[in-house]
Image: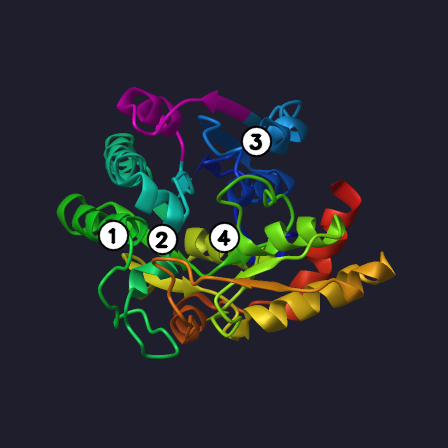
C-alpha cells in the first residue's frame, strides 16, 4: 500500500514487532516504501523468514531476532526509535484454549515488557494490535468501542489485558498509546498452512487443491472481514495524528460490513474459478461449531472516521479479489 498520501514523516524511525508475520511484514514493506527507517523484531514462532527476506538488503531496515518475553530484547529494539507498531502476539482462539499459559506469557508478559521498554526509551507513541475478540459475549451489533462483554477465550482475555495495561501506562507514565481492535484481517502473505491458519487462506489453499473446505457450524456465523491495506492505513493514521482526543484510546479496525461463511466460500469459489473453472463445482462440508467462537461480528468504524479520518478503500469483494490473485500467483 502507498502510504505517502497520509504524510507520514519519512525521517521517523519505527519499530515493528512481529515483523516477519502477516500484518507486521506488510507494515514493514509500506513503511520502507515511504522512506522510513524500520527496525523489525521477531522470534519466528509464527512469522516466516521469507516475509522479511526482501527487506534485508535495504539499508533502512534492521532486523533483530528476539523475543518480547525477554526484556533485554525489547529494550534493544526500542532504543532510539520514534514509534512502535506492536504486532507481536500469539494469535488464535483454539491455540489459547489448548495452551493458555504460553498465550498469556507472550500476549500479556511480552506486551508489558514492550510497554516498559517503550517508556524507558522515550518512545513518542506506542500503537498496538488489539482484537475484536475483546467484545466477547456482547450480542450488540455493530460493535462500539465502549461496549464490551465478557471474554470467551484465554486469547480474548490477554488482548483485553493489553488494553488495560496500555491505559495505565498512558495515565501513569504519560506514554501515548493507541489500540487497534482488528476484525478478521486477510490479504497477501497470510499463511494458509498449519493447524491455526485463518479461515480465508485456509479455504483458498483447499479450493486450489480441489479439496472441500469445512465450515464450522451451518455457515451462518458472520465476520467483518478486513483487508490488509485498511489495516495499514489505520496503523499509519494512529502514528501521525496530532489530535489529542484521538490518543490513549482504542479503535475498531474493519470495513463495517458483515459476511457470513457461506457467502465467503461463494465469493472465494467465484474468484478462484476465474483461474481454474473446476473450483466452481467443489462442494462445501460442514462440521461442528468451534469452541470459543463468537457467532457474529460487525464493527462500527464511526470513531475511527471521526477522530483519525479513517476511510477504508477495500470492501470484502475488492479485498478478496486482490488476495486471491496474490495467492494464485505466489503459492
User: What is the count of numbered marks?
Assistant: 4
CA–CA distance in space, label 3 to label 4: 23 Å
Determine whether 172 is above or below 317 in the image.
above
Q: Which residue, given by chain and number where applicable, does mark 3 sit on?
A: 48
Residue 85 rendering spot, x and y as whole percentages:
42, 43
The CA span between labels 3 and 1 is 26 Å
Give the secondary structure at mark 1. helix
Q: What is the C-alpha distance between the residues marked 4 and 1?
A: 26 Å
Left or right of 162 on screen, residue 38: right
As helix, strand or loop, the secondary structure at mark 3 comes to loop
Callout 3: few (<14), some (14-19), or many (20+) C-alpha neighbours within 10 Å? some
Q: Which mark is residue 130?
A: 2
Crowd around label 1: few <14 · some 14–19 · many ≥20 (10 Å)? many
Q: Nearer the viewer, residue 318 or 293?
A: 293
- Sequence order check: which comes first, mark 3 or mark 1? 3
Q: Which residues are magenta?
A: 62-81
**Residue mark closest to the camera, 4 vs 1:** 1
Residue name at image x 49 percent, y 30 percent: 40
Which of labels 3 and 4 is toward the front? 3
Q: Is residue 157 magenta?
A: no
**Is 158 or 123 nearer to us in this picture?**
158
Q: Quadrant of residue 270?
A: bottom right
Amino acid at each position: 500500500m502507498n502510504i505517502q498520501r497520509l504524510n507520514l514523516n519519512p525521517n521517523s524511525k519505527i519499530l515493528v514487532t512481529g515483523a516477519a508475520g502477516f500484518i507486521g511484514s506488510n507494515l514493514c514493506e509500506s513503511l520502507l516504501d515511504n522512506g522510513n527507517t524500520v527496525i523489525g523484531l521477531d522470534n519466528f514462532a509464527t512469522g516466516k523468514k521469507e516475509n522479511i527476506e526482501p527487506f534485508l538488503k535495504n539499508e533502512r531496515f534492521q532486523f533483530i531476532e528476539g523475543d518480547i518475553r525477554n526484556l533485554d530484547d525489547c529494550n534493544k529494539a526500542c532504543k532510539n526509535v520514534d514509534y512502535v507498531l506492536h504486532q507481536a502476539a500469539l494469535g488464535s482462539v483454539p491455540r489459547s484454549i489448548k495452551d493458555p499459559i504460553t498465550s498469556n506469557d507472550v500476549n500479556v508478559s511480552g506486551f508489558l515488557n514492550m510497554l516498559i521498554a517503550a517508556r524507558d526509551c522515550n518512545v513518542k507513541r506506542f500503537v498496538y494490535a488489539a482484537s475484536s475478540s475483546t467484545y466477547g459475549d456482547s450480542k450488540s451489533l455493530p460493535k462500539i468501542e465502549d461496549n464490551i462483554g465478557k471474554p470467551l477465550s484465554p486469547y480474548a482475555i490477554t488482548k483485553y489485558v493489553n488494553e488495560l495495561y496500555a491505559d495505565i501506562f498512558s495515565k501513569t507514565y504519560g506514554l501515548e498509546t493507541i489500540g487497534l481492535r482488528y476484525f478478521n484481517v486477510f490479504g497477501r502473505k497470510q499463511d494458509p498452512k498449519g493447524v491455526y491458519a485463518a479461515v480465508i487462506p485456509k479455504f483458498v489453499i483447499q479450493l486450489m487443491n480441489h479439496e472441500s473446505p469445512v465450515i464450522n457450524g451451518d455457515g451462518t456465523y458472520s465476520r467483518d472481514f478486513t483487508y490488509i491495506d485498511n489495516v495499514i492505513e489505520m496503523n499509519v493514521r494512529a502514528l501521525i495524528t496530532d489530535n489529542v482526543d484521538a490518543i490513549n484510546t482504542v479503535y475498531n479496525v474493519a470495513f463495517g460490513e458483515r459476511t457470513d461463511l457461506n457467502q465467503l466460500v461463494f465469493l472465494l469459489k467465484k474468484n478462484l474459478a476465474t483461474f481454474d473453472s473446476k473450483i466452481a463445482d467443489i462442494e462445501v462440508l460442514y462440521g461442528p461449531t468451534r469452541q470459543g467462537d463468537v457467532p457474529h461480528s460487525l464493527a462500527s468504524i464511526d470513531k475511527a472516521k471521526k477522530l483519525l479520518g479513517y476511510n477504508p478503500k477495500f470492501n470484502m469483494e475488492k479485498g478478496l479479489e486482490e488476495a486471491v490473485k496474490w495467492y494464485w500467483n505466489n503459492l
